[in-house]
């Protein structure tokens, strides 16, 4: 018999609505509120030994205290599995479900599973760490969704093989797994093309990431007073690559002083980018980083000042996460130096 | 590569001279090549001075 602890918010725990959103965590024995759907889905396979409840606002406003107390409550019941939610499209609830599942897995080593709608902010925040079953936006199909959450949870408890996100109904965790298939890539690609041409649904094997919209920064008002920086993802490094910038899948960037340089001496620079033929930019680094003409424009007064540091990394097979982090770090340094605008040259 | 720049949400995009030498062109003489580079950088300064509301590809210099 699998011992299960459920986590629900004040609403699904039958404490009340927004008026009860501030309540502190507690644990009641057995299945209460929405946890009864989990018990029903478990059938004879397991038993909900306790239901944890916590108000949405308490969890959102004091996340560390809320999670610490709930982890202790979970530990006290020694379950084989934690089922959190489902949270549907309720944002505070979804984040609490994700955070509690992650904490219980990591701190107690107890498997945890939750469910929510894809637009719940908890889905994107925790889907890499936690198995999150895809649900509808509201509780209309609660029992059916509880069954899918429980089915995945029982697999985790029994250490059975977990299927793909599509087959087991959870959000992709960003894990690539090799799978033997009968047809070659050429055959599969041709079948996809034919399906597309005849208007049938096509599912890519390599889903493209979606990119959040980036608000456009305001324009530079007076270029003659602006400080302009040069940044590149094309792999410029000083000879010897002192910062060990990786030739691909970069995690690092370099900051290279150009103070006093009217141009870049090819003998002093190299290029470690492994994603394009770097012959020509090694012959003349200005083909990548235009220090020569930027200095001319500075001297002519077309721009106020050329920033005296060039930032560089290699943009090839670089993960989105590292790209975003490096971009943020470079942007912070540029802002701290009062840089007005950036010309980022890309290969 | 401008479609990639649009897809990832870069807001001011200036088409340059190619992947293997974005700010150069080995078919040109050194002086012509530098003049091309200067036009690309000037176009980038124009782009920085322009109001945009979404990813915008400026005319190639």
Image: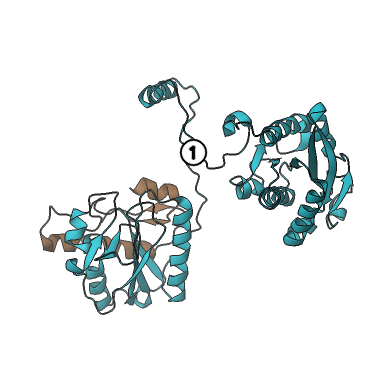
Chain colours: A cyan, B brown
Q: Position of residue A206 (x, y in %)?
A: 45, 36
What residue is drawn where x is 28% and y is 62%? A236
* A334 up-or-down from A123: above or below: below
Q: Residue furthest left?
A: B29
Is residue A147 in view from this perspective? yes
Is residue A218 in view from this perspective? no
Q: Which residue is mark 1?
A: A176
Query: What kind of element bears circle 1?
Result: loop
Looking at the image, which is closer to me, A182 or B46?
A182
Report how many numbered discs are placed on residues in the image. Answer: 1
Is residue A336 left or right of A109 when viewed as pictured?
Answer: left
What residue is drawn where x is 79% and y is 39%? A4
Looking at the image, which is closer to me, A239 or A22?
A239
Quarter of the figure with the N terminus of chain A? top right
Q: Position of residue A165 (x, y in %)?
A: 58, 34
Mark 1 residue crowding within 10 angstroms, few (<14) / some (14–19) / many (20+): few
* B16 up-or-down from A149: above or below: below
* A206 up-or-down from A258: above or below: above
Q: Position of residue A167 (x, y in %)?
A: 60, 28
Q: Position of residue B7 (x, y in %)?
A: 43, 47
Q: Chain of mark 1?
A: A
What residue is drawn where x is 12% and y is 63%? B31
Is residue A290 left or right of A175 when viewed as pictured?
Answer: left
């Amino acid at each position: 018999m699998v011992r299960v602890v459920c986590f629900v918010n004040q609403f699904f725990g039958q404490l009340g609505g927004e008026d009860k959103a501030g309540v502190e965590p507690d644990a009641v024995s057995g299945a209460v509120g929405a946890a009864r759907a989990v018990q029903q889905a478990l059938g004879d396979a397991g038993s909900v030994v306790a239901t944890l409840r916590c108000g949405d606002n308490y969890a959102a406003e004091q996340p560390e205290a809320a999670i610490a107390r709930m982890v202790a409550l979970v530990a006290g019941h020694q379950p084989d599995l934690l089922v959190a939610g489902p949270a549907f499209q309720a944002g505070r609830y979804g984040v609490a479900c994700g955070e509690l599942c992650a904490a219980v897995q990591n701190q107690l080593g107890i498997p945890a599973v939750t469910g929510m709608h894809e637009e719940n902010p908890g889905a994107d925040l925790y889907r890499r760490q936690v198995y999150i079953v895809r649900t509808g936006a509201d509780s209309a199909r609660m029992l059916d969704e509880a069954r899918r959450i429980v089915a995945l949870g029982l697999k985790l408890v029994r250490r059975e093989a977990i299927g793909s996100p599509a087959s087991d109904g959870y959000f992709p965790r960003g894990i690539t797994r090799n799978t033997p298939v009968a047809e070659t890539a050429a055959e599969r690609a041709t079948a996809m093309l034919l399906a597309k041409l005849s208007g049938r649904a096509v599912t890519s094997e390599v889903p493209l990431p979606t990119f959040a919209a980036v608000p456009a920064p305001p324009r530079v008002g007076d270029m003659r007073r602006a400080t302009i920086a040069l940044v590149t993802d094309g792999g410029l490094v000083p000879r010897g690559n002192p910062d060990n910038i990786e030739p691909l899948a970069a995690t690092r960037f370099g900051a290279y002083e150009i103070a006093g340089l009217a141009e870049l001496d090819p003998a002093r620079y190299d290029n470690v980018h492994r994603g394009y033929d770097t012959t020509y930019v090694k012959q003349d680094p200005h083909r990548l980083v235009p220090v020569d003409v930027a200095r001319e424009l500075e001297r002519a007064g077309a721009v106020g000042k050329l920033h005296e540091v060039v930032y560089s990394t290699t943009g090839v097979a670089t993960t989105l996460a590292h790209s975003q982090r490096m971009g943020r770090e470079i942007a912070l340094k540029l802002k701290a130096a009062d840089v007005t605008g950036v010309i980022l040259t890309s290969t | 590569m401008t479609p990639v720049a649009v897809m990832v949400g870069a807001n001011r995009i200036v088409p340059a001279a190619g992947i293997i030498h974005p700010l150069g062109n080995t078919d040109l003489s050194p002086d012509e090549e530098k003049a091309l580079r200067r036009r690309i950088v000037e176009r980038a300064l124009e782009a920085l001075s322009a109001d945009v509301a979404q990813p915008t590809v400026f005319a190639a210099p």
